[in-house]
Image: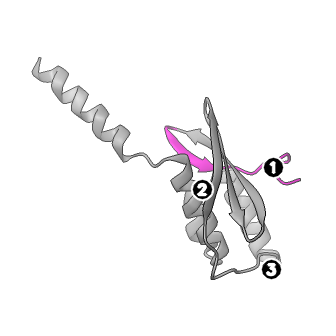
Amino acid sequence: MKRYLICLATVFLLCSCSRSHTEVAKDFTENMAKGKIEEAKKYATESTGTMLDFAGGTGNLSVHPDFKFEVIRDSVADNRAWVVFKDGNKEETVQLVKVDGKWLVHFDANSMK
């Protein structure tokens, strides 16, 4: 019984520490808006981080220090999530995937259109 309670407490602790998909999307987009690419990469998949390095190296990233993240809607399907947020007067979508129990922003060819 004691071992069961320890396992249950460990699972609860691990689950409570994971960040939601909307929190990850917020942290990612706010860091990107401020030009903090290395910080944003902490919330992205490895392949997305590589894309950010490339974009940052070309100087194609603009900085928006007054950016405010406002969720419009979100959805989750299995290990994928989408967060639609307001960027000025337009809506943008961030796609996330769950990797090893952790939500990460992921760009692919379809999300870059």
Residue type for callout 1: Ser
* Mark pair 2, 3: CA separation: 23 Å
Q: Which residue is mark 3?
A: 59
Give whichever of discs 2 and 1 has the lower sequence position. Answer: 2
Is label 2 in contact with label 3 (beta carbons under 8 Å)?
no
Relative image position of residue 59 (x, y in whole percent): 80, 80
Q: Given this view, does label 2 or label 3 mark the residue nearer the observer?
A: 2
Q: Which residue is mark 1?
A: 111
Where disc 1 sits, the SS reads loop
Q: Given this view, does label 1 or label 3 mark the residue nearer the observer?
A: 1
Classify 10 Å Cα crowding around label 2: few (below 14), some (14-19), many (20 and above).
Answer: many
Give whichever of discs 1 and 3 has the lower sequence position. Answer: 3
89 versus 78 height, above or below: below
Residue at the extreme right of the image, as rendered? 113
Which quadrant holds the N terminus? Answer: top left
Give whichever of discs 2 and 3 has the lower sequence position. Answer: 2
